[in-house]
Amino acid sequence: MLRLEPRPAAPRWLEFATPLMAVAATMIAGGILFALMGFDPVAAVRTIFWDPLFGTAAGYSRPQLLVKAGPLILIACGLAVGFRAGIWNIGAEGQYIVGGITGAAVALAAYPAEGAWIFPAMVVAGAAGGWAWGMIPAMLRNWFGASEILVSLMLVYVAQKLAAWMAFGPMRNPEGFGMPGSRNLQQYPAAANPELVAGTGAHWGVVAAALAVVATWFLMSRHIRGFHIRAAGLAPRAARFAGVRPAVLVAFCLGLSGALAGMAGLFEASGPGGQIIDSFGSGYGFTAIIVAFLGRLHPLGILLAGLLLALTYIGGELAQLTMQLPAATVQVFQGMLLFFLLGFDTLTRFRIRLGKGGA
Amino acid sequence: MTTTELFRAEGLGKTYPGVRANDDVSFSVGAGEIHALLGENGAGKSTLVKMIYGLVRPDAGHMRLGGAAHAPADPHAARAAGVGMVFQHFSLFDALTVAENIALGMDAPPPRRELSQRIAEVSAAYGLPLNPARRIASLSAGERQRVEIVRCLLGGPRLLIMDEPTSVLTPQEAEILFATLRKLAAQGTAILYISHKLDEIRAHCDRATILRQGRVVGTVSPRDHSARELAAMMVGAEMRLVDRSGRQTGEAVLTVAGLTSAAGHDGTLLRDVGFAVHAGEILGIGGVAGNGQEELIAALSGETVGRPGTVTLTGTDLSGLGPEPRRRAGLLAAPEDRLGHAAVPEMSLTENALLTGATRQGLARGGLIDHGATRAFAERIIAAFDVRTPGPGTPAASLSGGNLQKFVIGREIMQQPRALVVNQPTWGVDAGAAAAIRQALLDLARGGAAVVVISQDLDELLELSDRFAALNNGRLSAPVPTEGLTIEQIGLMLGGAHGMEVAHVAA
């Protein structure tokens, strides 16, 4: 029998080293996998991790880095706050979709009006939509003790159906020749979320992500609310003794992560995505969970992890194009990354012992 | 009665971080003797038998079994040496049969048919009717215990340890058990019998070793003592003269009336608890753990809120308010559990100072944490209460129990409460630190605060408190002055031997 035994004290630097070790292990394991599939492993890993930034076609792929990292970081910041409190919002994907829909709804209702108020109103509506979607698991947990993990996850599928219905029904573009999908907001200046500086890929969502990183850092290390969140995650009874009301904390964390995910959805719907289609949810909400953990639930870590995961998206697509690697490559890489991270984490806190357990 | 000595412990000691669970424990058990191990919860009985059964290794002292040194590395070695143990909680698989369960628990099980036959033999020989083919799920608690006993007996133990065996039995089943134990004893098996049911021990045990706070109080013949005398030895209250000078009792500060709570996590509920504590006064609340202490401190700290009018601080009704507003009003509390309740183990002392000090010390004005002021507050606690630690950045979990307790109590006292409620303020704390904490509580009262000390330590309560009340099964007795209170009276207030049994059945 294998048995896990706690280590006396893991050195602190390991906490920062394990994400790097996980990245290295993912590259090695990924290389082995590609070799087994008959691809050149070195070329494949280079195509995914190097070429998007420094390869010959980097001029096209580099701006994509911020386009992909923006929503990941924005969502992960919200998730990390909840995770620190032991509140597990697994349904950011659903909140992202609903935020995209509610934000876009403002634009579609206003169309074809012009006005500086439209885009800010969309941002607020997107955040509100995500917040409301996050409040469903929060309320169900507070009122009935339902697991927020299951409820938030299941609501992702509800949100996906909602997006499909919107794309085929109420939001379908009346001038779209019957094609599913809403109007393209990119072509509606008052509602568009354009690239702010040409060649960088940075849109308002990237600005919001940067602000979220700073705000999350401030909340968690300077504000009493963040202190209470950390206390609740480490010792719930002590937090209650300090005066934290668990129900309020659940609502705050799920509401905050929902609002940030909803905002990310809106920035996508009005920017790179441009419209609400039935497949509007593209997995950012799930990948952001990996970003949050890889970043050690710390804002700065999330910033770096978000960029790295964005790189796997772009590199994976590039590898598909140039090397004909399968489309699942990105997901395999992201999955391995989380797997190795959790594995290394476990091994830094526990050691494996062979032999029988206690009587 | 005692013929030949079978087991002897000499100077056994075991220290857990912050707790001296066993200290210089020496006693002996003769072959054929039923020997009781008597003590309150937390007196060190479990640690002691775990050392004999090889689950815990002693730090000091040694044991001898049948003339040879006994130092089992694990329960296998203990069983091989002839020690058997029946635990209070059974480890049986419901879906398997009696024979299958017994085979699973054996180091070298014989073939199934042979085993079934031996089970039948043993159960017949000792009057423990048991069908080897029955599934565990269909058995009563008493029958399940028989499975555990038979499993032990198949190993042919010389010393059989029974951990509170009758707590799950009906009186009739208990009688069957005692008949079995007497039969075993008659054949020379030594039995170490853990319980705090005094009548049972007086009726069936040859000798009793009494433990209190990890030390042996004495070994007596239980038949020569009344249940009340045994109880007095267990709780060990001796009158002590303390100087309570310099304190003036003023008007009522903390008033509790008609406090009733829903059942807590262990099923205890408070029933119509009421008392008033005056400025400069210490009220001691005694009782065996699990009689509502946790619920009482939660109701006072604000972790659970009550009906209007139940908790009042100098005329202000705090009943419906949470911990933070109560702190602001001046009602502070220090719960029993240091790690995870009074403090966050992984957080530094500075952060733990912020945990309850934020409001009264103005450490987070407008929500913004003042890290400098917080650290200074932690440093003041560390200096004033002689907390031994490298510094305020040290995680709470790495402090010894006594040092963390000084920090936790100090944190509340330094905030100058108008009323302070503490639960088990010196539990598991060494004598020096305990004296410092008690002195700090006395000084606080001298300064005009109302103090409530909830404790299981009667010595402590008599030393500190002006008035004493007993908490028994969620009910609080009327407080009486401790001046001139005798151990007999305290025993009666705690419900005496009879009350302990009632509390035990209810638990």
Image (cartoon, coloured by chain):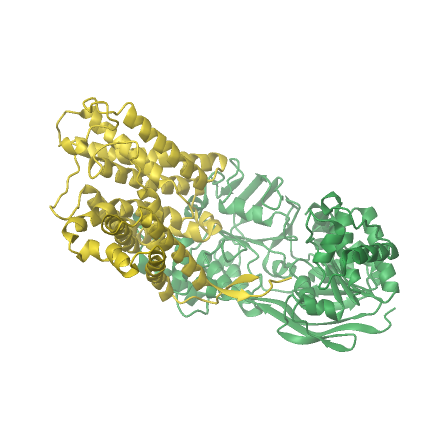
Chain colours: A yellow, B green
B313 left or right, relative to A205 = right
State the quadrant of the N terminus of chain A: bottom right
Can you give x and y, in whole percent of width and height, for residue A195 in the image? 14, 42
Which of the 4 image quarters holds residue B149? bottom right
Relative depth, front residue between B298 and B489: B298
Extreme residue toward the front, this view: A38
At a point 64% along the width and 65% down the height, the residue shown is B241
Residue B164 in view:
no
In the displayed structure, does residue B279 sit left or right of residue A227? right
Indicate whether B281 appears above or below A139.
below
> Residue visible at 15% across and 55% down?
A56
Residue B20 makes an appearance in the image: yes
Estimate the x, y position of residue B380 in percent, counting from the top left.
39, 64
Q: Quadrant of the C terminus of chain A?
A: bottom right
The spot of residue B404 in percent (x, y) is: 48, 63
- Count how many numbered circles sit on residues in the image: 0
**Residue placed farthest to the bottom in the image?**
B68
**Along the viewing direction, whichever of B177 and A104 lies nearer the viewer:** A104
Give x and y (percent) for residue B227: 79, 56
Of residues B228 and B124, the one drawn nearer to the viewer in this rendering: B124
Q: Nearer the viewer, residue A353 or B16?
A: A353
Q: Is residue A346 left or right of residue A175?
A: right
Which residue does the image show at 24% across and 55% down from the upper left? A47
Q: Indicate whether A105 appears above or below B72.
A: above
